[in-house]
Image (spheres, rainbow, N blue to C red):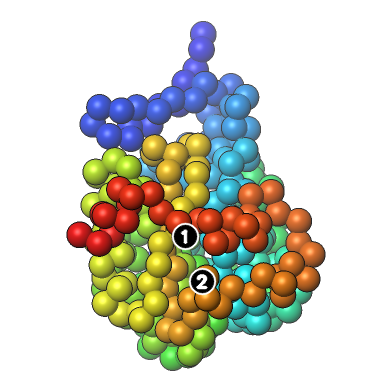
Amino acid sequence: MELWYTEKHTNTVNFSIQVKRHFYSESSPFQQIDFFESKEFGTFFTLDGLMMVNEKDEFVYHDMITHVPMATHPDIKRVLVIGGGDGGTVRELTRYKHIEKIDMVEIDEMVVRACQKYLPITANQLTDPRVTLYFEDGLKFIQGKVAEYDLILVDSTDPIGPGEGLFSMAFYTDCFKALTETGILINQHESPYYPNYAREMKRSHDKIKKIFPISKVYQFHMPTYPSGHWLFGFASKSLDPIKDFKKEKWEAFGLETKYYNTDLHTGCFALPTFVKKLLEE
Ligand code: SAM
């Protein structure tokens, strides 16, 4: 008998992956966690019935959340990751030998422990000595911090459940205060394609624009996320991702990447007309 994982993307669109087995299913105090094994995407896990990370396309998301800010400001030394329990974002950060400190604040320890066991492809650098794990709410963790980080990466779930507050004005204001003068904030911007996701993207972007003098949006394609068309927000007190792009300096790091490259760095900020209109409305 065939076994399928099915996820609802809109009220009239479902997305399905044939799976070999559904081998983990636990409820944490925060969310429902499930792990599956599939032919096409390898091992993947979902939170509250939504795809988080799979072995096949995780490189796209983790390259784009990490290397775009690192190539804009290659001297980043202190980083805060909020969410990111699978460890993929931390794994990419640890490839920069000059980064001194990586704090990761994940609300749900069960996600981290399960990923360390079943998804080592992303979780394998969480034991790097520069990494400190905090199991608490990112919203509370950031309150009262002043100029402590050069980079904040919000690698969160969607704005429902525990991730909801990570899309609020109060949270973005706290991020602004926690960043140094050349600091950068990257956050989940959802998808521009289906109206239910585009609404959230627009709400989030409008809030960030009010707080940060530089606020841009960049795109990438994630085959397993709704519509496959996904966005991150880039916000900074003083650095522009195109004008301040340090192409040669980043290339000198000699990092091999599967999705990100320096042509794509400028290309990903060129948005389709319908996305530009949405952002300008
Ligand atoms: N790449 C994924 C995506 O966009 O689908 C996100 C990956 S990561 C697994 C998201 C993590 O954010 C989850 O493990 C969740 O527990 C964590 N999270 C949600 N709300 C949080 C909060 N308020 N503070 C810290 N972590 C949070």
Disc 2 to disc 1: CB gap under 8 Å: yes
Q: Which residue is mark 2?
A: 241
Q: Nearer the viewer, residue 3 or 41?
A: 41
Pointer 1: residues within 10 angstroms few (<14), some, or many (20+)? some
The residue shown at (50%, 49%) is: 220
In the displayed structure, would residue 176 be above or below residue 138? below
Q: Position of residue 80 (x, y in %)?
A: 53, 74
Amino acid identity at mark 2:
Pro
Dot 1 falls on a residue whose secondary structure is: loop
SS for dot 2: loop
Q: Quadrant of the C terminus?
A: bottom left
Is 110 situated left or right of 122 in this image? Answer: left
Above or below, comparing residue 163 to residue 97 in the picture: above
In front of the other: 30 or 98: 98
Q: Is residue 190 left or right of residue 41?
A: left
What residue did someone put label 1 on?
Answer: 269
Q: Position of residue 235 (x, y in %)?
A: 42, 73
Q: Residues within 10 Å of mark 2 (few under 14, many from 20)?
A: many
- Quadrant housing residue 19: top right
The percent coordinates of residue 150 (x first, y second) are 54, 82
Q: Is residue 34 visible?
A: no
- Residue pictured at 43% horizontal, 48% vertical: 230
Write down the quadrant of residue 103 in the picture. Answer: bottom right
Query: Percent x, y for residue 74?
Result: 65, 77
